[in-house]
Amino acid sequence: MKIKRLAHIGIAVKDVDEVAKVYTEYLPLGLDSRDTVGELLTGFIPVGDTSIELVMSTTEDGVMSKYIAKKGEGVHHIAFEVEDVAAAMAELKAKGVPLTSDEPRPGAHGAKVAFLHPKATHGVLIELCEYPEKH
């Protein structure tokens, strides 16, 4: 598996617009793009070659709403860009590393994504992302 870069740090938030103010008003950064993936709304704030991804549920019973109710707002995951997420998943499975799904799932910006189970990574949710060529 080849890791290209640290793609983003995901932050669980209740409100993308409200939290974006921390980065756009306190710091000299800007909210660059938004995307909707299922019931999730994301906002991306570029910082060099990586981004901060603000992630919120659009429903009260959504995955991020449940996460925030349990753990509060804050760092949710770190994401690495890989060349081929399916090949990376196969390599990890061969090593016995548990994943949260058997196949890549759709992610923001047209990415294919997979997550390493946090029980195998000392509590850190690690995302692998494969972006389309024109990302």
Image (cartoon, rainbow, N blue to C red):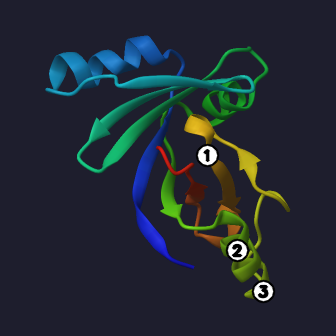
What residue sits 27% from the left and 21% below the top?
Answer: 22
> Image check: 125 left or right of 58?
left
> Image check: 41 left or right of 96?
left
What residue sits 77% from the left and 71% below the top?
Answer: 98
Give amino acid for label 2.
Ala
At numbered mark 1, what does the secondary structure look like: helix, strand or loop? loop
How many numbered discs?
3
Give amino acid for label 1.
Ala
Furthest-front residue in this view: 134
Q: Is residue 54 above or below residue 9?
A: above
C-beta proximity under 8 Å, tags 1 and 2: no
Task: Name the residue carrying label 3.
Answer: 94
Task: Name the residue carrying label 2.
Answer: 87
Q: Whole-Å distance between the Cαs marked 1 and 3?
A: 23 Å
* Towards the viewer: 66 or 98: 98
What residue sits 69% from the left and 57% below the top?
Answer: 114
Q: Where is residue 51 in the image (x, y as percent from the top left)?
A: 36, 42
Question: Closer to the N terminus: mark 1 or mark 2?
Answer: 2
Between marks 1 and 3 in the image, the one whose residue lies nearer the viewer: 1
In the picture, residue 123 is in which quadrant? bottom right
Q: Whole-Å distance between the Cαs marked 1 and 2?
A: 15 Å
> Image check: 15 left or right of 6?
right
Q: Where is residue 64 in the image (x, y as percent from the top left)?
A: 66, 30
> Image check: 59 left or right of 36?
right
* Towards the viewer: 74 or 99: 99
Q: How crowded is mark 1: few (under 14 residues within 10 Å), some or many (20 or more)?
A: some
Give amino acid for label 3.
Ala
Task: Name the residue carrying label 1.
Answer: 111
Question: Closer to the N terminus: mark 2 or mark 3?
Answer: 2
Q: Where is residue 23 in the image (x, y as percent from the top left)?
A: 26, 25
At numbered mark 2, what does the secondary structure look like: helix, strand or loop? helix
